[in-house]
Image: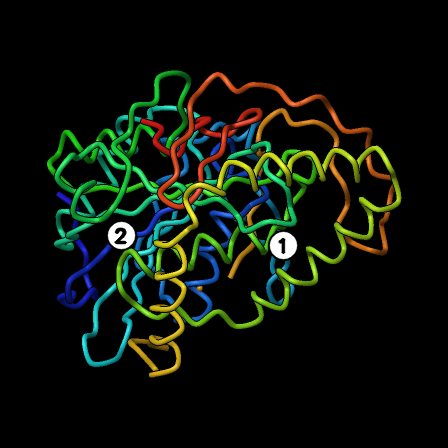
Amino acid sequence: MIELEGVPELIDPVMVAAFEGWNDAGDAASTAVAHLEREWKGEVFAALDAEDYYDFQVNRPTVFMDGGVRKITWPTTRLSVVRVGGEKPRDLVLVRGIEPSMRWRSFCNELLGFAHELGVELVVILGALLGDTPHTRPVPISGTTSDADLARRMDLEETKYEGPTGIVGVLQEACTHAGVPAVSLWAAVPHYVSQPPNPKATLALLNRLEDLIDVRIPLGELPEDARAWQVGVDQLAAEDSEVAEYVQTLEEARDTAELPEASGEAIAREFERYLRRRDGGPSGPATGHATADGGDGPPFLRENPGERTRPPKPPKPQTGSAESTDSTDGTDDGNTSDDGDSSEE
């Protein structure tokens, strides 16, 4: 039995989770949850026992000085609660940690134990994958679920992915078996610029989350960071004609694929988001920065102008082993994210 002392009764709680590692290309997903914790001043109320789930030779603890005293921070997964104010307040249970090294089923059962005790009504798991998508276009976000009824009600894709999976897929499947509604949101990160951070992908995940759970998320400096990131990558890509040509090829493929759809639903979502922000919709009073490998991608461009290196020669596009479906615009996993499809199980 999990005892949650000091946690008040929650209002329409939604659990939002992200994990560093294979499921987190460009650190986009874990940084999104960190943003929520920072903006809404989340208070950590629980942490999983690191001894149970982590190999410390893979995820090593770190030593730091606190007032002259040496302390150790152990790799783990922490839970915090934030209240989103407004006319219809609701609570978010934020889960942020590192993909566990072992005992994944026990790990998921422990998280579901917290969800049950807190009365969580929906679990949203954020992830990011590497894909053949140009950095100059809107970030494709895929929303999927294993629940056919939930897919219809929330305009999501019903997952059909088959192949290797990570903790995001395992947790979503555990939720399904436990009867807890669960959704996965995946951002596609350009494989040729996979080094974190990727504020553009983080921003896209938060916008999609905002639409999904109907709250207004304070974005802070993320929009400006995303613009600066794109300008920096534009400049670096322009230094190599082959990279620029490869990006143009991706742009043409993306534009051709989207042309028949006219993106009517995407335009409607953007307009609704604009109205919600203009009218001062639900909002309330997320720190941290993750480290993720994002998979075995090709060499990447460096976003930091102080560490500029010449962009790599673009690899030939590879066909991912997994399909990808997208509630806004689809993408294939070019390499190694949690699944080539945000519909990953």
The residue tagged 2 is 15
Where is residue 100? Give x, y as percent.
Answer: 42, 31
Label number found at residue 134: none
Of pointers 2 and 1, the one earlier in the residue sequence: 2
Residue at x 41%, y 27% (from the top left corner): 166
Vertically, is 28 above or below 44? above
Horizontally, is 301 left or right of 9 in the view? right
Horizontally, is 202 left or right of 191 in the view? left
Asked whether residue 166 is in view, the answer is yes
Disc nearest the viewer among 2 and 1: 2
Where is residue 336? Give x, y as percent.
Answer: 54, 25
Asked whether residue 76 is in view, the answer is no
Q: Nearer the viewer, residue 338 or 138?
A: 138
Q: Considering the numbered disc 2 on the image, is that residue within a helix, a strand or a loop?
A: strand
Residue at x 59%, y 38% (from the top left corner): 133
Where is residue 113? Give x, y as percent.
Answer: 17, 42
Quadrant for the C terminus in the image: top left
Q: Nearer the viewer, residue 41 or 139?
A: 139
Q: How many C-alpha atoms fall within 10 Å of the one at disc 1: few (<14), some, or many (≥20)? A: few
Residue at x 27%, y 71% (from the top left corner): 83
Residue flagged by tag 2: what amino acid is it? Met
Q: Residue 237 falls in which quadrant of the image? A: top right
The reply to whether dot 2 and dot 1 touch (C-beta < 8 Å) is: no
Q: CA distance from mark 2 to mark 1?
A: 30 Å
Residue flagged by tag 1: what amino acid is it? Phe
Q: How is the image coloured?
A: rainbow
Q: How many C-alpha atoms fall within 10 Å of the one at disc 2: few (<14), some, or many (≥20)? A: many
Label number found at residue 64: 1
Vertically, is 146 above or below 211? above
Q: Residue 264 falls in which quadrant of the image? A: bottom left
Q: Considering the numbered disc 1 on the image, is that residue within a helix, a strand or a loop?
A: strand
